[in-house]
Image (cartoon, rainbow, N blue to C red):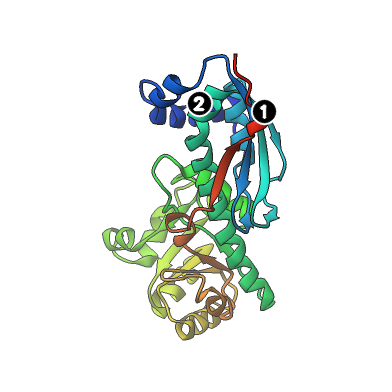
Amino acid sequence: MFVPRKILEKKLQSMLTEDIGQGDITTALIVPASSVAEATVIAEQTGVIAGMEEAEVLLKSLDLEAEILVQDGKKIAPRSPVLKITGNTRTILSAERTLLNIISRMSGIATTVREAIEKIQRANFKTRVACTRKVAPGLLYFDKKAVLIGGGDTHRLHLDDMILIKDNHILVAGGVKETLEKTKKSSFSKKTEVEVTNAEEALAAAEAGADIVMLDNMSPEEMRHVIGLISGRAKTEASGGITLDNVREAAATGVDIVSIGALTHSSKALDISLELEPQSVRLP
């Protein structure tokens, strides 16, 4: 995922602006304006680091020096230094919480994604792990990029990425076949996926030309049956109720993709801290 640096800066600075409000009153009262210092960002627990690029862009936009010690996607041990910061002490402290929020959330998501993938790979299954659009409002770019850093698939980034026909679309159109007839007007470049809840709908979707059939909230036994019926005419995606506890079981059905909403809406943030280096603080 790539966006021009200035656009990423704007996204990040809007987060910082929201946090600072009219000014960091505590830091302004305590820290001299000309004070400079060094700080270290530390990962307090094992996990997969993500958000280093975003951290660097934010810090440099504030005229702070940033040295990345651990690259995005690397697994780290507890108490691992991941980033060094040098510059104005007031600026470091005022940006601290926004900086840590970004790294800890993105790293938490990347860590959960990696765990899901490793569960599947250890069993020698080829199923791909994907997220959904259940992201925090305003954080779509960061949440989806964290999934990518963790090794997962971003699925749809936006509604215009592909045609994804869900139960309410089918209800309005009058059936799976009728819904797919309407989507033939779209560009040849757009894939079509259909959400189904039973074998009859799945077979109808595959026969009508769906590229992907989403097996919604089906048991492993139901999924195996449907995958056999489709017999390679479309890719299959398992969705609904899949967690780290049952992702391996879902993959064992032979499904091509498992999508897990919890990767982005419920991943636990990684514990990240920032510590000023005492000997580095220089006062006027």
Which one is nearer the viewer's eye here, 108 or 33? 33
Check disc 1: other Cα within 10 Å, few if <14, some if 14-19, many if 20+. Answer: few
Picture coordinates of residue 243, whole percent (x, y): 47, 70
Going by the numbered disc 1, the residue's amino acid type is Ser
**Residue displayed at 50% across by 26% down:** 10
Q: Can the viewer see residue 141 in this picture?
A: no
Picture coordinates of residue 236, whole percent (x, y): 53, 70
Which one is nearer the viewer's eye here, 161 or 104? 104
Q: From the image, tell me which residue sits under label 2.
A: 10
Check disc 2: other Cα within 10 Å, few if <14, some if 14-19, many if 20+. Answer: few
Q: Is residue 72 above or below residue 223?
A: above
Relative to 110, 94 lies left or right: left
Q: Quadrant of residue 1?
A: top right
Which one is nearer the viewer's eye here, 47 or 223? 47
Q: From the image, tell me which residue sits under label 1.
A: 280
Q: Is residue 170 above or below residue 245?
A: above
Label 2's element?
helix
Q: Can the viewer see residue 14 in this picture?
A: yes
Going by the numbered disc 2, the residue's amino acid type is Lys
**Residue displayed at 45% across by 83% down:** 222
